[in-house]
Every structure is written in C-alpha cells, then in structure tokens.
Image (cartoon, grey):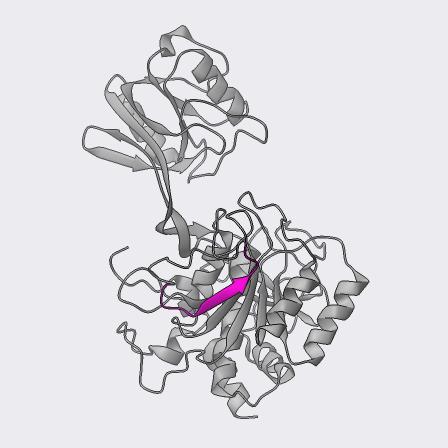
Amino acid sequence: MSKETYPYGVKMVQATQLWDADLNKRLDQMATTGSGIKIGVIDSGIFKNHKDLVGVAVSGYPGGDNSTRWDYDGDGHGTHVSGTLAASLNGAGVTGVSPGKVSLFMVRVFGNNGDWTYSSTLLDAANRCYAAGCKVINMSLGGASPSSTEDRGFASLYSKGVLSVAAAGNEGTTQVDYPAGYGSVISVGAIDSGKRLASFSQRNADVELVAPGVAVLSTVPFIETNSITVGTATYSGSHIEFSGRGTVSALLVDGGRAAAMNAAWSGKVVLVERGDNTFNEKVQNVQNSGGLACVIYNNIAGGFSGTLGEGNFSRIPAIALGQANGVTLKQSLGKTATVTSRKETNVSGYARYDGTSMAAPHATSVAAVIWCAAPGKSNVQVRNALDSSAEDLGTAGRDSSFGFGLVRALAARDYLLNR
C-alpha cells in the first residue's frame, strides 16, 4: 500500500479526531496520541520490522527460536492486532488508533499455528506486562472455562492500576468467554462499518463496549496472492486452506460442482461452483482427475473463505472466488487461464480480518490514547470515561449486544478531562 490509509475503524472510534482532525495525513499540533503509555499485547508475537511498525517502541517476552520468541509471528494475528493498536502515521500503509506513539510489550503465547505454546499461564503473561510497566493490556483471545485463580489475579492487577481488555468471543451466542467475563476486564464485542452487531459477536451481560471487528484492515507479516488471470483480466480470491501453492497455466474448463471425477479435467484448470459437497471433496475430485488447479466460486453473492479441513491437503492449488467473478469466468471457458496461489512471509503485508479479536485493540488503544491526555487519572476513571462516553447502540442504555455502546476516543478524552 503506497498511500497512507486510515482504516474505517480508526475513524469510527474517533481516533483521528484526536491527532488529525482535518484528515490531512499529518499530526496536528498538540495532538493526543498515546505517547508515554505502554500497552501489553498477549498474542502470537509481532513482525516488528513491518514498515508500519518499525518506528514503534516494542519489547517483549519470551526469547527462544521462531516457535516461541516474542518478535516472530508465524500466525499473523499478533501483528494484525498490533497494527490496529499502533501502526505509524508514516505516509504509507495503515495507521493505528495510536499513530505509532504508544509503546508495546509483547508476550507471545501462541505458536505459528495458533496453538498455545507459552510455558506458563495467561495470568503469568499479564503479570509480566504489569512488571514491564504496561498500563493497559490487550487480550484478543478467550475460552469458555473460567478460573477463580485468573479472576483473582486480574482483580489484583486492576487494584494495582492496570486496565485489562479482552475479546468478547466469536461464537455468536450468549456464552461468556474468559478473561472477558471477569469483572475487572473490559469485554469488547464487534460491529461492522455500518455499526451493526457482527453475527459472530457474543451477546451477554458482560459485554461492556463494542468496536469495529468486521473486515478490519491492518498489518500482517506476509503477502498473499491468490488469483486467476484470463487474457488481460485478473480476478482475486482467497486461498483454500490446506490446498497446494504454486502457479499453473492451462485451458479453463467447467467442472460443475465437482461431485465426481472426470477424465476431461486432466491437465486443465477447473472452474467449480460451491455447494452440494465439501471443498475437500471438490478439490480431491479435480486432483484425482488430473486437474492442475481448482477454482471454486460462491453460489451466493459475495466471496467466502474455505478450508479442506484439518488433516486434509492437496498438491494442486485451490482458490475461492466471489460469485460474480465466477459467473464472469464462465464466459472464458476454453481459454488459457493462469492460477497463482503464493504466500511470501516476513514481509510488510496487509489483510482484512474479522473477529472480536480485531475489536478489542480498538478499545485498548483508545484507552491508552485518552490516558496520555490525563496521566494522573486512575484506571477506574479511564474505564468510566470509556463507558460513559460510548455511543449508545441498540436498546437504550447498556444491553447484552452492544454493552454501553461504541467506544469513542474524542468523547472519552473530553469526559476524562472534565471530571
């Protein structure tokens, strides 16, 4: 991304109104940026050499090899969260809620496949953030099982002045996830660009605030290319998880819904419609027929993400396309098509993610940014400012879907300074 972009969420939570009110892509004089506040980030690590993060003061724990060390992120989740928290205003890429002025302390608890790899507990990770001087802790994680030890531990951190923030959960039910469900932790749900509750966002009495969590654009440590080109037209899609990678060129043929193998697909790129059978069955039928690539397009409007499922894999590349692009491609049957599925790692990339994991860092960074404007205030006062100044959404007053409402940086800062 060659030009500076303010993701919709950064503007929706009023962050730009604190440091670039006229949206000229330059910091205002006397801007409120979060400078001097350290945020703890308990996640999958960080690619600190990303061009939008290289100017941010970052440290962390633990050391070790690429499977455990804090400054490596093979998953991408932690780098995405960090970009929302703190990506720099540097003339290119994206900018975070704080324009690169907060500092970050990373505690890596997830491995390169998203599995828990930390040698100790979540509470230990949070205590390390406190010991490092963090005033706010972001936890874009959670689970359904509460722990009385954790509950007491986070309450202790709260009494010491730490403000902890966590993702409400992505099951789309009334289940309470933890640590978001502990009374000393702010639980953050997700809304979309139209301020509608995300379908996956948890709904329960512990939800305290909401923030943007749908199609959130932020930093990732990779660049993905998943496309099909016919003539001068290129159609971009997404990688079908666990399928092969590579670039192949061959005649494009219609595979219907790939319900069975077909010898006519041998040596071809096969265009397949979603529906009737699993993605794995479709891709395996194409591969076992000698097909060189499988391009699956949606059977309803819009795009989608697909997977072959844990334990399955294919040698051939498989990509997912939106319905409109798939229908258009049917007009190019019999022409040469080039399918590319490639992932470059440890590079400065960008991606749009969904989840309350993406909503939480909006609220976390707002807390940090407003706290820098009133460093003498307590964590309790900052929390009250966030809640009292939120934009009420849904049912009047606090409700189980939106909590107190959409977190708002300008309104919260003014509330904090005037009380």
> Does the stretch in magenta take in 26?
no
Q: Where on the picture, by quarter, is residue 360?
A: bottom right
**Residue ranking furthest to the bottom:** 418
Give the percent coordinates (x, y) of residue 18. 40, 80
Quarter occupied by the N terminus: bottom left
Total marks placed: 0
Task: Answer above or below: position of 110 versus 322.
Answer: below
Quarter occupied by the C terminus: bottom right
Is residue 208 visible in the rendered image? The answer is no
**Residue ranking furthest to the left:** 232
Q: Which of the pair 94/71 is nearer the observer?
A: 71
Q: Where on the picture, by quarter, is residue 296?
A: top left
**Residue ranking furthest to the front:** 64
Q: Which of the pair 240/271 is nearer the observer?
A: 240
Q: Residue at x 49, y 68 (%)?
A: 104
**Residue ranking furthest to the right:** 148
Q: Is residue 52 left or right of residue 196?
A: left
Give the percent coordinates (x, y) of residue 114. 57, 46
Give the percent coordinates (x, y) of residue 101. 41, 75
Q: Majority secondary structure of the magenta segment?
A: loop
Give the percent coordinates (x, y) of residue 253. 33, 17
Task: Answer above or below: position of 147 versus 55.
Answer: above
Q: Is residue 216 left or right of residue 106?
A: left
Q: Residue at x 33, y 59 (%)?
A: 51
Q: Which of the pair 18/40 is nearer the observer?
A: 40
Is residue 273 visible in the rendered image? The answer is yes
Q: Residue at x 39, y 47 (%)?
A: 222
Q: Is residue 395 left or right of residue 85?
A: right
Which span of residues is magenta-colored?
54-63
